[in-house]
Image (cartoon, helix red, strand yellow):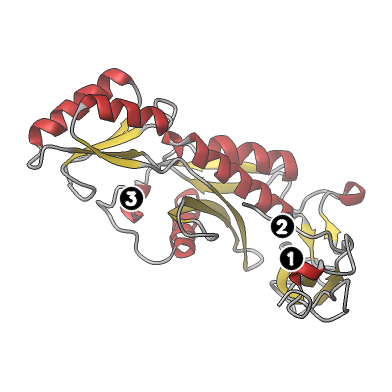
Amino acid sequence: MNARAPKLQSGGKSLSSKGRKSIYAGRKIALLTMHGKEKVIQPVLTKSHGCQVELVTGYDTDRLGTFTRDIPRDGSQIEAARKKARIGMELAGLPLGLASEGSFGADPFVGMFPWNLEYLIFIDDERDLEVVGMAQGAPKDLHLAAHDWAAAKAFVVEAGFPLHHMVVRPDGPNDRRVRKGLSNWQELEYAFNSALAQSSNGQVFLENDLRAHANPTRMKNIRSAAEDLVSKLASLCPECGTPGFGIVDRIKGLPCAECGASTQEVRAEVHGCIKCSFRQTRERLDTTTADPGRCSYCNP
């Protein structure tokens, strides 16, 4: 489903180009998580920037919202990530912080399939800077209301169990009598039978546990978000040297190869600084014309 990104002119400075040392080399960065995200974030940041990602504990991040709907998230996804990072920075006493926040919904293409969007925010209070890494993709996010163990067993295999943990509750998706993090067959069958005994409608609601440590597919997306973040941190503004120099706009109008009329295909990308007003337009390098099939005149 992911379209290949067009090749565009390169520009801007990389932190690693010509042997340049990252401005964050050796620096400590707070990461607040209780779901094992440090396992995929730490290696990526350390390898690319030589920084020290310090795991911060002592705060229950489930207080900011849960995927099992027993505690609603307050604010937007990026606001939740920012709040998490700020708490971690305060607990660690550091001016640099990281936090990850995920969301699940329908895919952006046809709106029919599960989709996972991950944000990884980096806050630098010394430079008054925020940079956000992002990744998205199809997750293991399935659910079923089952009346018997045979149906439940067949479903959880499809849902990736036991590598992907399960959540079980009586009756329906909003029942507060919830068992999370079920990761082996014995405890899953016991939880299912217990929920069935408590059920008023004779069914048990099963779903994937979407917490990072319980969902390897989601953890891969978090790693991809970390890779996107380090790429952005490595891109310095050519004007002021601030990290995070990247795409701020796309310019459509690639001419049709047949008639020369402007199309809705991307002709160039505008890269900009998140601190100063510097902008740089980069034309596509892979092609100078659009397929006539994309032209509203040749293919109305």
Q: Is residue 300 visible?
A: yes
Q: CA distance from mark 1 to mark 3?
A: 32 Å
Residue in the image at 83% along x and 55% along y:
14
Q: Which residue is mark 2?
A: 232
Q: Amino acid at mark 2?
A: Lys
Rendered location of residue 69, percent (x, y):
28, 52
- Between 193 and 43, the residue placed more toward the observer is 193
> Quadrant location of the C terminus?
bottom right
- Between 4 and 258, the residue placed more toward the observer is 258
Rendered location of residue 218, percent (x, y):
50, 42
Rendered location of residue 136, percent (x, y):
57, 52
Q: Amino acid at mark 1?
A: Gly
Q: Amino acid at mark 3?
A: Thr
Look at the numbered disc 3 and give the secondary structure of its residue: loop
Residue in the image at 85% along x and 60% along y:
13
Residue in the image at 87% along x and 61% along y:
10
Q: Which of the 4 image quadrants contains residue 73? A: bottom left
Q: Is residue 269 visible?
A: no
Q: Are marks 1 and 2 in contact (CB under 8 Å)?
A: yes
Extreme residue in the right direction:
18
Identify the mark nearer the N-term, 2 or 3.
3
Q: In the shown orientation, is residue 236 left or right of residue 37?
A: right
Q: Which residue is mark 3?
A: 66
Q: Which residue is mark 1?
A: 246
Look at the numbered disc 1 and give the secondary structure of its residue: strand
- Between 224 and 160, the residue placed more toward the observer is 160
Q: In the shown orientation, is residue 84 left or right of residue 124?
A: left
Residue in the image at 69% along x and 72% along y:
274
Identify the mark nearer the N-term, 1 or 3.
3
Q: Which of the 4 image quadrants contains residue 254? A: bottom right
